[in-house]
Amino acid sequence: MLEKLRHHGQMSDALRTMVFLTLSGGFQDGYTYMGRGQVFANAQTGNVILFGVHLCSGELFAALRYLMPVVAFGAGVYFSAFVRHRFGSSRRLHWRQLVLGIEIALLFLVGFVPHSLDIAANVLVSFVCAMQVQAFRKVRGNAYASTMCIGNLRSGVQCLFDWRHNHNPATLHKALQYLTIITVFGVGAVFGSLLSRTGNIRVIWCSCALLAVSFLLMFIKEEEETREEAEKA
């Protein structure tokens, strides 16, 4: 019974948890673009385009600089899926919290990677972003991404269209929720960019702190939900 309550109470799609995940996602993109050689951590479409541009210009090293984060992103998705497969039934720690722990450890390591190894730093951050986008895909039951905006923008506009025709307050609420997520991501990107302009590579640890808050909030939510279920039983 307790195991069931813990699984139900984890609530990794709670809005307050997602806020800090999304702030971190935006921060990471601002950090790699402004502080690590103008490479995207999350927007792999942009990296693919820049890879093609530099490849056509004969700039092979520059092209490789954009290709490696794309490969790392794919590896991060695969690894996150492996963590879920291997530890999905863990009783002590939810597999998503394990993902967050690994993310925090890797981003902490990035803070020690010198600018001479910016490629390695970008690879690690892209790997982390992929783990996060694979592990956290819903907010309050709705599909969502904490490390990019295109899907959230599409879903938000679709909800606005639906609300215009059905006048359902719940649909408008979903649209505003997506708008909030996009705004939060933008705020994270702004702060990541501004702090990275200082040249201090350790500002990425701000992202570690944001992820740590989400990690802890999942524990708090679990305790709240477990207590509520126990009172109803």
Image: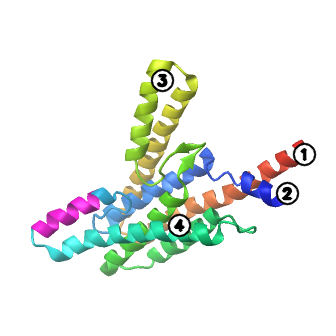
Say what amino acid the circle numbered 3 marks: Trp
Q: CA distance from mark 1 to mark 3?
A: 38 Å
Q: Residues within 10 Å of mark 2 (few under 14, many from 20)?
A: few
Residue farthest along the left direction in this orientation: 57
Q: CA distance from mark 2 to mark 3?
A: 40 Å
Q: CA distance from mark 4 to mark 3?
A: 35 Å
**What is the magenta range?**
46-56
Q: Nearer the viewer, mark 4 or mark 3?
A: 4
Residue farthest along the front direction in this orientation: 85
Name the image quarter holding residue 169.
Answer: top right
Residue on which the image places disc 4: 81
Quick one: SS at disc 3?
Answer: helix
Residue on which the image places disc 3: 163
Can residue 128 be seen at all in this image of the molecule?
A: no
Q: Are marks 2 and 1 in contact (CB under 8 Å)?
A: yes
Q: Is residue 230 left or right of residue 169?
A: right
Residue 140, position in %: x, y? 60, 42
Residue on which the image places disc 1: 233
Q: CA distance from mark 2 to mark 1?
A: 10 Å
What secondary structure do most residues of the magenta stretch adopt?
helix
- Tell me what residue is drawn at x 45 percent, y 48 percent: 185
Residue on which the image places disc 2: 1
Q: Which mark is residue 141?
A: none
Q: CA distance from mark 4 to mark 2?
A: 26 Å
